[in-house]
Amino acid sequence: MIIVMRSGATREDVDEVSKHLHELGFQTRPIFGVTKTIVGAVGAPDVDKFGAAEQLRAYETVEEVHLVGKPYKLVAREAHPEGSIVRVGGIPIGGPGVVMMAGPCTIETEEQVFATAESVSRAGALILRGGAYKPSTSPYSFQGLGVPGLEMLRAAADRYGMKVVTEVMDPRKVDLVGQYADMLQIGTRNMQNYDLLKEVGLARIPVLLKRGMSAKLEEWLLAAEYIAAAGNEQIVLCERGIRSYDSFARNTLDLAVVPAAKAASHLPVVVDPSQGTGRRNLVTPMSLAAIAAGADGLIIEVHPNPDHAIKDGAQTLRTDQFEALVPQAKQVALAIGREILAPDPVR
Amino acid sequence: MIIVMRSGATREDVDEVSKHLHELGFQTRPIFGVTKTIVGAVGAPDVDKFGAAEQLRAYETVEEVHLVGKPYKLVAREAHPEGSIVRVGGIPIGGPGVVMMAGPCTIETEEQVFATAESVSRAGALILRGGAYKPSTSPYSFQGLGVPGLEMLRAAADRYGMKVVTEVMDPRKVDLVGQYADMLQIGTRNMQNYDLLKEVGLARIPVLLKRGMSAKLEEWLLAAEYIAAAGNEQIVLCERGIRSYDSFARNTLDLAVVPAAKAASHLPVVVDPSQGTGRRNLVTPMSLAAIAAGADGLIIEVHPNPDHAIKDGAQTLRTDQFEALVPQAKQVALAIGREILAPDPVR
Amino acid sequence: MIIVMRSGATREDVDEVSKHLHELGFQTRPIFGVTKTIVGAVGAPDVDKFGAAEQLRAYETVEEVHLVGKPYKLVAREAHPEGSIVRVGGIPIGGPGVVMMAGPCTIETEEQVFATAESVSRAGALILRGGAYKPSTSPYSFQGLGVPGLEMLRAAADRYGMKVVTEVMDPRKVDLVGQYADMLQIGTRNMQNYDLLKEVGLARIPVLLKRGMSAKLEEWLLAAEYIAAAGNEQIVLCERGIRSYDSFARNTLDLAVVPAAKAASHLPVVVDPSQGTGRRNLVTPMSLAAIAAGADGLIIEVHPNPDHAIKDGAQTLRTDQFEALVPQAKQVALAIGREILAPDPVR
Amino acid sequence: MIIVMRSGATREDVDEVSKHLHELGFQTRPIFGVTKTIVGAVGAPDVDKFGAAEQLRAYETVEEVHLVGKPYKLVAREAHPEGSIVRVGGIPIGGPGVVMMAGPCTIETEEQVFATAESVSRAGALILRGGAYKPSTSPYSFQGLGVPGLEMLRAAADRYGMKVVTEVMDPRKVDLVGQYADMLQIGTRNMQNYDLLKEVGLARIPVLLKRGMSAKLEEWLLAAEYIAAAGNEQIVLCERGIRSYDSFARNTLDLAVVPAAKAASHLPVVVDPSQGTGRRNLVTPMSLAAIAAGADGLIIEVHPNPDHAIKDGAQTLRTDQFEALVPQAKQVALAIGREILAPDPVR
């Protein structure tokens, strides 16, 4: 930790700050510059530096505090330098294979979810997505089918040999949703819903953690750290676009966060180009770009008839569009020395 | 609702879209322009237009859909043109008086919370704030004292004739926190935590709804609508700064949202200049600016000794700074024909 | 300057970086922490630290470089601790008086500009604003009347005893516009048009420097430093709203930048609530809030008939609305111990 | 154009707005809804709708105005449905081949620019980039070598059979820079410097138009329209990252704007992953992602010794890193059915 004192800070001011640092367990190393004094604080590896920095910033005599090193530990790349692989019902995310996840935004009917699962599994998707509990911006919009939706989703996945990822929003429903899902999704609106994070941290199944709508990379990794610290390190990060001032797309898909997250953390990183753009015609190019950027998987909204989807139709691929995407995705994956993970007859 | 068809859309395309609108209950009024056709959809006041727009946007032949009117009803200004007053333990927020709320970021010790309450109540604060459950970005930071913190907060408020506002993060704790609080705070990270919103919507006490870190005004009002739709219309909106690309302050305090929210909704609007700036030296000028902009109250972090506050010290006023602020706030309130609400011996 | 080395950096890496710093003229003070080494660079007050930091960041072995102190000098508060006063044709901006500037967005006709000048001067505006060269987003929109517009503006101002501020966009027109103006405005789109900044830096009249659409405070002050370094320290900063993700207003008016800029710099700071909100109904509350936040002046768009204004009508006050605003502004100024500067019969 | 009247608007209000529209040359088609009236304005293809919309928004009785169709014409995809190819000294940008542009941020010495040109041309770059006039945030930072820099750049390009792209910032220097360059670059800070746009619009050589730091796609295309309207349609768009609230990268590289810009406009689109990320380790993955997203070229900062680059070293590839990138870029280009354009011995 580096503390920059304000110009004009006296020797006593520096001593007061140093004393506070010593109480917290740090050793201090002052540097006296021409106009300012800097205090280096070292030697306290286990102190909550995030909290300590906040306290030091409160001094009138302190101008800035810079943290050195990362405030997260379990999810840091250093904890697992070779990268971790998260197995979703046996399907490895984070290995050499890129995993395709696809399905409807919202589970509407048995017919719809089975038709989608049939099509996307044939095309090459291994994991079926679909929402039974929907975080709708308006209380008057459809909120999801709940348990009957989960049942349809599970049945459709089982029928076509797929695994299931679906969102949980309520800490009281983690167990319930976990009975149907192979991976629990935490949506963008709940990235800092800490009681929910702790609850899925107690679950024994993987978690897909979407990035908050305007979350910094560090905040996202600290949200993952909440889950890991509660006992569950099976976490897959999912970039889904950040808030934008522009209107040509619904969000700004931040693909540079993919290599940045993978450099900072050992967790796998996947991309949601549907939420990430909100426009059907942008989904295919951004899917390919995400793979080229190093994503470990894609999660894509697909519907047999998006014109009549209850939600998010504008960003949803038709099943034939998804079928056309997969071969292109394979080419791009090969170009960077990876492959699209294929269904394993033995798995 | 207005549907703009893509150029090249045929008569059949327009008919297909119109048919969909009819099925949803709308009547349609097409306008044929030089290159584009526009379809006006009218006459279905009770349809979920948010959802309907989403469906229409899914058509390849549709370029844009514009909603006409507001997607919220209960919290719309039209529902209560004269503005609503929310009573927090009898203290009216939203009337002519501007309400001062103050207290520590985090409840640390009995001594700290009593000393703060004594000082801020003497200075003119009517409602005591303080966190017993803290949404910390890092899992390793202090998470709050929990119930013992709530007890201290309640005791200090009672001792000095104040009311209590405190945050609840977990839907399972709404009842518990409600036993100690006169107003439940929903923090910025939980503005779209819909299960929590529904739960406080069932509570019988007022809710302070902070704006999400990058929430649009419409999204914020729809979050309030969730609470209202669940049965609780005692909602106070709180602007607390939005995500910024700049670093001179922690957030960008968006004061224009105060008159904008009051024009769109009948709910009272208060401002948090502490979170909203993150810098102690900006709190006082932004408090005065908030009142001038029409805020119905302020919620300010105050600590007897911010240099040793556990959290948020850098944005916390010392008690003497808060004491100096109140007389200035009174002058500004008077300048715009309001007053700072004073403690009422009879209340 | 503080250089944080990556973990794993060797003694040789630290030496290489130190050698580079020595060549630039710095002395170095290393601090060896548990996992990382920090190098403090001191003792080179005249080196371009901005440039030096950029060079150091290029090393693979360097993780972060933090600048200590401000990269601007002439406009820093330290250069003029009591704050500077800029005189626009004798009218002091930056003193105890708050200066009202008003006028149409665009100069349209002699009748329009005279009617506006008559009204706003009577109401209390001392400086007449109006554009003869307009930075229109579309090349097909009105680009301004040019010299005939400048002549009307000057004539109207002279007639009603006002001073003139107007925008210059082209470095080749600085002299020309300077013949008509008492203050040259640099618009938001040109805040980093450095050739234009240098050119107005050679002018002998004050400059109103609007903040760039997404400029950081530091970048804004460095733009001012360009003007000052070219020889012109008569600079007035103008906050005019920053880019927003929301649509309830055209921009986010960042009032906290007013006290922040005044703390960092000795230059006066004024606010443009018209551009800053883009909505007529938000102009009056944000004008009052700006004064309460400490602004040294306001620049407001006023038109006798905004419904027929060529540009920006939606954010333009009618003359009667401006007349109603001034008395309220006076009250708020008084509340914080200032006054609205009144026309001086002797001036 | 669609005008949504406020609820409560009377028949007279609608008539007044309609009259204004008729005067502008529109025909009107009102739609009377339950609570609101909508007026469709059609039949005036040549009216400046941008300006007209602004005027209509000024009415108190008007709630919203939506433009139908695009405010730009010459650069719209419709004007040239098959996409345009811009030839830079004979090199086609916008055809099936993806063009590599590379070179130092700043021209420093003859040795540096020749060494870079030698290396990048050998690796596959066809166009040499390098700044002789640098838009530095600080007036005290290096501002570029000027004409001697241009001479070095031209000589190095000629020596290695490359073409030249370099920035021009000052409208008075367009001719001068045009004597050395095959393509004139307009930097992000000058995207809305309209006098400069008009001046390069008069030039007879191609223009590389970088997106403004927080420009919307529409604003960017309107800036291009300025150049086209002045007579120069040889425009290449360049995405270079937008302002970000996060700090892991210097900007947010918005790759979705590549397919979106290509859908809206016939102009070629290239990507600058160096400025777009500001971090060397992100340049290669984002280069590959840009190609996968459909970019027509890349412009990359390369230096033989970035640790000693005067500017932007942290985002600059070493020559060996660029050499390693090109073969990967070739693979990704092939994967999507394109190729990296190779030097043509005959050209």
Image: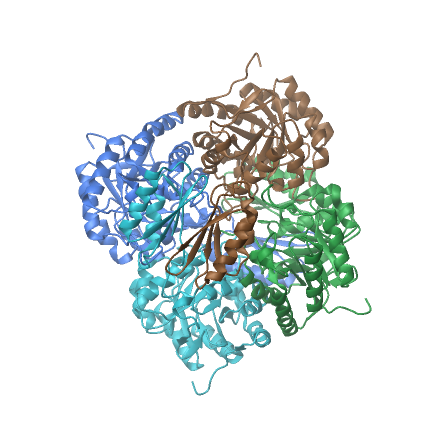
Chain colours: A blue, B cyan, C green, D brown
Quarter containing the C terminus of chain C:
bottom right
Q: Is residue D262 visible?
A: yes
Question: Compared with residue D40, is residue B82 higher up or lower down, i.e. above or below?
Answer: below
Q: Looking at the image, how many numbered discs can be counted on the residues?
A: 0
Q: Is residue B245 visible?
A: no
Question: Compared with residue A258, is residue A178 higher up or lower down, i.e. above or below?
Answer: below
Q: Position of residue A248 (x, y in %)?
A: 46, 43
When asked about the image quadrant of residue B320, the answer is bottom right
Furthest-bottom residue in this view:
B346
Is C212 on the left or on the right of A319, as rendered? right
Furthest-right residue in this view:
C346
Q: Position of residue D69 (x, y in %)?
A: 47, 42
Toward the viewer: D162 or A270?
D162
Toward the viewer: D156 or A97?
D156
Q: Position of residue A153 (x, y in %)?
A: 21, 44
Is B315 on the left or on the right of B19, as rendered? right
Toward the viewer: C287 or A177?
C287
Q: Position of residue C204 (x, y in %)?
A: 80, 51
Toward the viewer: C34 or B328?
B328
